[in-house]
Image (cartoon, rainbow, N blue to C red):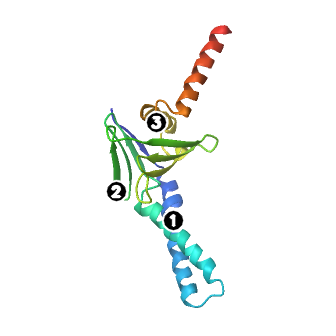
Amino acid sequence: MSKEYVFDKKMFIIRVIYAGILAAIVFTFGIYSIIGGSTMKYLWMFICFICIYTLITNFIAISYPEKIVIDNNAISFSAFNQSHVYSRKELIGFKIKEQQLAKKMYIRVNKPSLFKGRYWIDLKAYNNYKDLEKCLLEIEEIIHPDSLKANIKRNNAMYKERKRKDV
């Protein structure tokens, strides 16, 4: 059964598109300042580097996917008419760094690079985000059943069960 999770349109425009446009404007101004002989040449070079990184992650690498589709055979991350599709059979790595209080996740799939395999997921910006969080964590547990994180979750579940039975 296929499940589709979509980023809120207004938030996507503000967080991804506007941030990318701002980075492009600052990059242009930075190049102009470097060519014009600014006294802060190295600072502007650093700022231009950050702007290039932002443009790559926002528009080329799909690090902030607009749509996530999870089904029994594959998981796909999509934005700007591009998709990164991973079949469940080819998944050798699926690591999630959770930020529980902020409801965000940083996902690394297989061998992540600058252009593919790294995704920032702001759970609250997606429809049905609790189900999305559950599905992603299940995929991680299936791919890495012997990880320390999976062991801790199993132990915590066993502890809750024992505590519930004792009460």
> Which residue appears at 64% of the width and 41% of the height?
101
Q: Is residue 148 above or below residue 158?
A: below
* Name of the residue lying farthest toward the bottom: 36
The Cα atoms of the two marked residues, 1 and 3, are separated by 27 Å
Mark sitting earlier along the chain (2/3):
2
- The Cα atoms of the two marked residues, 1 and 2, are separated by 17 Å
Q: Which residue is mark 2?
A: 82
> Would you name the residue on which mark 3 appears?
140
The residue that label 1 is drawn on is 54
Secondary structure at numbered mark 3: helix
Q: For the point 55% across and 27% down, which residue is it? A: 151
Q: Please rate how many residues cluster around mark 1, counting C-alpha atoms within 10 Å: few if below 14, some from 14 to 19, many from 20.
A: many
Q: Are marks 2 and 3 in contact (CB under 8 Å)?
A: no
**Viewer-proximal residue, 159 or 167?**
159
The amino acid sitting under disc 1 is: Thr
The image shows residue 38 at horizontal and vertical percentages of 62, 88
Residue 60 sits above or below residue 145 on the image: below
Q: Relative to the observer, which residue lies in front, 102 or 88?
A: 88
Q: Secondary structure at mark 2?
A: strand
Could you tell me residue 85's position as x and y percent? Answer: 33, 47
156 and 60: which is toward the camera: 156
Q: Residue at x 47, y 47 (%)?
A: 108
Lower sequence index among marks 1 and 2: 1
- Residue 153 position in % (x across, y down): 56, 28
